[in-house]
Image: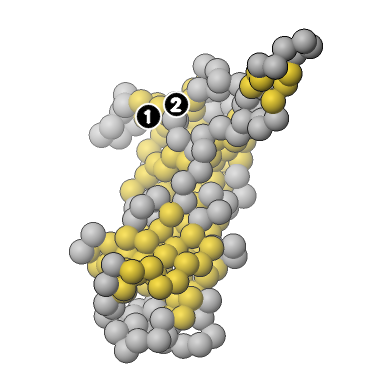
Amino acid sequence: MPKVSVVLDGLVIKEVELTKERTTLGRRPYNDIVIDNLTVSGEHAVFIMRGDVVTVEDRNSTNGTYIGGKAIKTQMLQHGDVLEVGKYKIKFESEQPAYDFEKTMIFKPRTAAPVPAKPVVAPELHGLIKVLSGAAAGRELALTKVVTTVGKPGVSVAAITQRRNGFFVHHVEGNDRLLHNGVPVGEEPAALKHGDLIVLAGTQMQFLQH
């Protein structure tokens, strides 16, 4: 479960798990994450969770929201990102295992040595995205993580998620709709099959699985 930690002067003063689609942060008491300090606006920022992807959005705050010293309006978060809100730091954590393993152990007859059960996910599940058009034509992106994002933040972004039963793609942000084999895809993930075509912000890509 993704979570954020509120840090002041190097000390964690609050930890909040992101369990809802929208988690608000601000000085007002009705926010999900309340930081009672004048450097924080009444409604400062909101964390938006869609599937496995979390995006932070600044709510036109007075002092702004920063990541790596750069003011942001909307940005997708990666595990370990640190936001600066007033004089506070907000650390985002969302580390997930690439595969789920069965925790039970199997004992063979007449032996005390435990044998790990087989993993739930087959290790031969490999996929990649090949860019077919634009400046990056010919480039290949291996899908080695649980969530792989493609596109340009602030313009148009899609996320490809690896699950037990295959790969899925959904739209994260941007006005240009994501097309999967010519059909628009929204926040509801679409299953990918070998050879499927994806179009994002005018760039054509192909999903390959082996």
Amino acid on which the number 2 mark rests in the picture: Leu
Tell me which numbered mark, 1 or 2, is placed earlier along the sequence.
2
SS class, disc 2: strand
| 16 relative to 71 in the view: left or right | right
- The x and y percentages for residue 160 are 50, 39
Numbered tag placed on residue 174 in the rendering: none
**Residue found at x 56% / y 32%:** 99
In this view of the protein, can residue 132 be seen by the observer?
no
- The x and y percentages for residue 97 are 52, 38
- The x and y percentages for residue 190 are 61, 40
Residue assigned mark 2: 128
| 165 relative to 194 in the view: left or right | right
| 134 relative to 115 in the view: left or right | left
In this view of the protein, can residue 8 be seen by the observer?
yes
Figure check: 38 above or below 13: below
Separation of disc 1 and disc 2 at Cα? 5 Å
**Residue found at x 46% / y 81%:** 34
Residue situated in front as seen by the camera: 183 or 36: 36
SS class, disc 1: strand
**Residue found at x 31% / y 26%:** 139
Numbered tag placed on residue 141 in the rendering: 1
Amino acid on which the number 1 mark rests in the picture: Leu
Specify the quadrant of the image occupied by residue 174: bottom left
